[in-house]
Image (tube, rainbow, N blue to C red):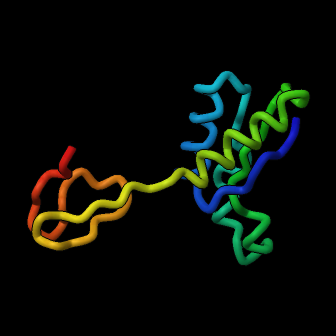
Amino acid sequence: MLRLARAPNIAIATLWVDMLRQAGFDAAMQRYFLGSAAGELPPGECLPEVWLMADDEREAEARALLDAFLHMPQRRWRCVCGELVEGGFEQCWRCGTPRPE
């Protein structure tokens, strides 16, 4: 087993594990509920972790995939109302106009 990353919360860790599994890696999350021990233990030691279970020879590939996922470019477009919309939004949050093709 090999630890790939610590996630800020269970939801993010689950997203990362699912993404790795869909790519064919045997990944798992550890420390599901250790967040409740923060204070008794150092907070950094209570974060959920993403582990590669058996494919140590594919470690570089798994880390590259996780890094690409973490640094995915975000779309940015300007609405007809003048608002700059960033991220994965499909419509303007100011006026509700759909993103142009």
State the image coordinates of residue 31 (x, y, percent, origin top left).
72, 51
State the image coordinates of residue 88 (x, y, percent, origin top left).
35, 53
What residue sits 67% from the left and 22% below the top?
24
Q: Is residue 54 left or right of residue 81?
A: right
Q: Is residue 35 left or right of residue 75?
A: right
State the image coordinates of residue 29 (x, y, percent, origin top left).
69, 42
Please identify the residue farthest to the top as the structure is shown.
24
In which quadrant of the rendered view does residue 21 lie? Answer: top right
In the depicted structure, whether residue 48 falls above or below residue 29: below
What residue sits 29% from the left and 60% below the top?
77
What residue sits 88% from the left and 35% below the top?
1
Q: Is residue 80 left or right of residue 14?
A: left
In the depicted structure, whether residue 96 falls above or below residue 11: below
In the depicted structure, whether residue 93 falls above or below residue 13: below
In which quadrant of the rendered view does residue 93 lie? Answer: bottom left
Q: Is residue 90 left or right of residue 42?
A: left
- Number of marks: 0
Please identify the residue farthest to the bottom as the structure is shown.
39
State the image coordinates of residue 71 (x, y, percent, origin top left).
59, 54
What residue sits 59% from the left and 58% below the top?
9
Camera-nearest residue between 30 and 71: 71
